[in-house]
């Protein structure tokens, strides 16, 4: 388990109140915010009072599951999972968090952003969720405030935090501007269901079939470009994501015909880690699992640990790349994230050439193979680089963006 016991000083209450002494809680503000000692200037209105919001209908709940590569699987009475449950994964640490998060629709009801739709992310608070829930909420709050105070401007490919408050029952509410209710996982699921439907009732027009595939290829590359731009922005600001996956990418559209308007945005920064050199030794126990794995990979100095953390994000992005290269191009149920990760890590030990040979022999994966084969197998080449077992050989987010597959030159 990555999350054990967080630092007690990393609390939502401290972040929102004790460290925001210059932040009035009764009106919108762009005033100074304090945390981690630097003075952060909020560049957008931030509302720290529940009276500035109206809450709408509930739209879902979720928890979290963490999969950490290259270490022993924690079997036995301390875990709720068996090897059979997870398809025989033997090379990952898998743990389920006990923090359950609720989501609500809402809107800003006062001030300059009146009428702006928001999505509320509700943490149970220390009373119900323990110190872990409190630390996750505080970390997500602090990370967004830091990034939104950047002198380089606000990242287009990150969700925007517009407010946060704590209720009398101890629940912690974060309000994000609603730029799309869909996730990359939603898109992949719907796309795979369309593949199944099209197989059952084939189009009489082969030209339209070809155009549909081209639209899907363009949409996925545009989606991946947004993900990598968001990740590059985080890394440029010395922050890691550390929970990147298909559910942590928000989309403003899932229509492949509207790909030119697509803006993917990274969300779920509760596990984000500060990798500024001066902060590495004080990154807290939320990052403990990361540094254990760094030591296991031979990264001990601050420079090596920072490089490992960035490369770890790139590896997660590589798994997301693989997911989006397969799931939307296959029939529903043919491939899922855990099966794909098992195939890559366990069966073929991150050998993408061997993986390709296996996939070529399976007719159900033909469209995924054709997608990665674009540009003389440019997709496989990039995927191999991002999933390199040696973290020192993985590309940066900027290098991934400049790869010929990611620029769209292969289309």
Image: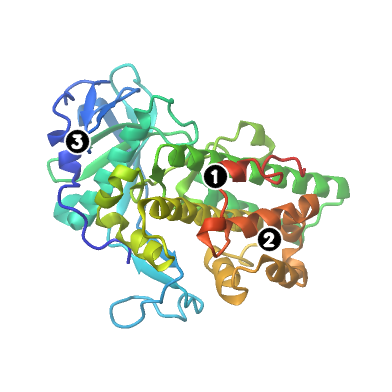
Whole-percent x, y for residue 379 in the image? 70, 53
The answer to which of marks 1 and 2 sits earlier in the sequence is 2
The structure residue drawn at horizontal position 57% and vertical position 57%, both measured from the top left corner, is 393
Q: Vertical placement of 228 versus 164: above or below? A: below
Whole-percent x, y for residue 55 in the image? 29, 35
The answer to which of marks 2 and 3 sits earlier in the sequence is 3
On-image quarter of the C terminus? top right
- Mark 3 crowd level (few <14, some 14–19, many ≥20, 10 Å Cα): many
The answer to which of marks 1 and 3 sits earlier in the sequence is 3
- Mark 2 crowd level (few <14, some 14–19, many ≥20, 10 Å Cα): many
- Label 1 or label 3, whichever lies nearer to me, is 1
- Label 1 or label 2, whichever lies nearer to me, is 1
Q: How is the image coloured?
A: rainbow
The CA distance from mark 1 to mark 3 is 32 Å
For residue 192, say whether it is visible. no
The secondary structure type at the circle numbered 3 is helix
Left/right of residue 1 with respect to residue 130 in the rendered view:
right
Q: Where does label 1 land, which residue?
A: 397
Whole-percent x, y for residue 251 in the image? 53, 40
The reply to whether the C-beta atoms of the residues labelled 1 and 3 are less than 8 Å apart is: no
For residue 249, say whether it is visible. yes
Q: Where does label 3 land, which residue?
A: 16
Q: Nearer the viewer, residue 10 or 335?
A: 10
- Label 2 or label 3, whichever lies nearer to me, is 3
Q: Where does label 2 land, which residue?
A: 330
Q: Nearer the viewer, residue 4 or 184?
A: 4
Left/right of residue 275 with respect to residue 406 in the rendered view:
left
The structure residue drawn at horizontal position 70% and vertical position 71%, both measured from the top left corner, is 354
The secondary structure type at the circle numbered 1 is helix
The CA distance from mark 1 to mark 2 is 27 Å
On-image quarter of the N terminus? bottom left
Mark number for residue 317? none
């Amino acid at each position: 388990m990555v999350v054990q016991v967080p630092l007690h000083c990393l609390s939502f209450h401290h972040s929102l109140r004790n460290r925001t002494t210059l932040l009035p809680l009764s009106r919108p503000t762009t005033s100074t915010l304090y945390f981690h000692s630097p003075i952060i200037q909020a560049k957008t209105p931030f509302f720290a009072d529940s009276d500035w919001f109206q809450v709408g209908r509930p739209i879902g709940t979720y928890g979290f599951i963490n999969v950490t590569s290259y270490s022993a699987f924690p079997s036995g009475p301390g875990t709720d999972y068996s090897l059979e449950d997870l398809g025989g994964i033997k090379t990952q640490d898998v743990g389920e968090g006990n923090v359950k998060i609720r989501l609500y629709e809402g809107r800003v009801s006062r001030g300059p952003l009146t009428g702006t739709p928001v999505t509320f992310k509700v943490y149970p608070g220390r009373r119900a969720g323990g110190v872990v829930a409190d630390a996750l909420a505080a970390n997500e709050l602090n990370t967004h405030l830091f990034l939104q105070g950047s002198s380089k401007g606000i990242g287009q490919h990150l969700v925007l935090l517009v407010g946060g408050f704590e209720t009398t029952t101890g629940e912690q509410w974060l309000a994000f501007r609603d730029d799309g209710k869909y996730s990359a996982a939603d898109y992949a699921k719907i796309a795979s269901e369309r593949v199944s439907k099209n197989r059952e009732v084939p189009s009489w027009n082969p030209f339209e079939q070809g155009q549909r595939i081209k639209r899907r290829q363009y949409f996925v590359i545009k989606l991946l470009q947004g993900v990598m731009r968001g990740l590059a922005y985080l890394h440029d600001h010395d922050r890691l994501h550390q929970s990147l996956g298909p559910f942590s990418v928000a989309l403003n559209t899932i229509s492949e015909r509207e790909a030119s308007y697509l803006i993917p945005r990274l969300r779920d920064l509760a596990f984000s880690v500060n990798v500024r050199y001066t902060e590495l030794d004080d990154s807290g126990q939320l990052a403990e699992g990361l540094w254990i794995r760094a030591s296991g990979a031979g990264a001990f100095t601050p420079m090596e640990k920072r490089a490992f953390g960035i490369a770890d994000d790139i590896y997660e992005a590589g798994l997301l790349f693989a997911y989006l290269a397969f799931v939307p191009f296959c029939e529903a149920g043919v491939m899922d994230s855990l099966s794909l990760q098992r195939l890559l890590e366990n069966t073929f030990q991150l050998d993408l050439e061997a993986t390709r040979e296996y996939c070529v022999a399976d007719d159900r994966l033909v469209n995924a193979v054709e997608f990665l084969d674009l540009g003389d197998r440019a997709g496989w080449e990039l995927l191999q680089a991002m999933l390199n077992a040696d973290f020192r050989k993985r590309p940066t987010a900027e290098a991934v963006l400049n790869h010929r597959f990611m620029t769209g030159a292969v289309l």
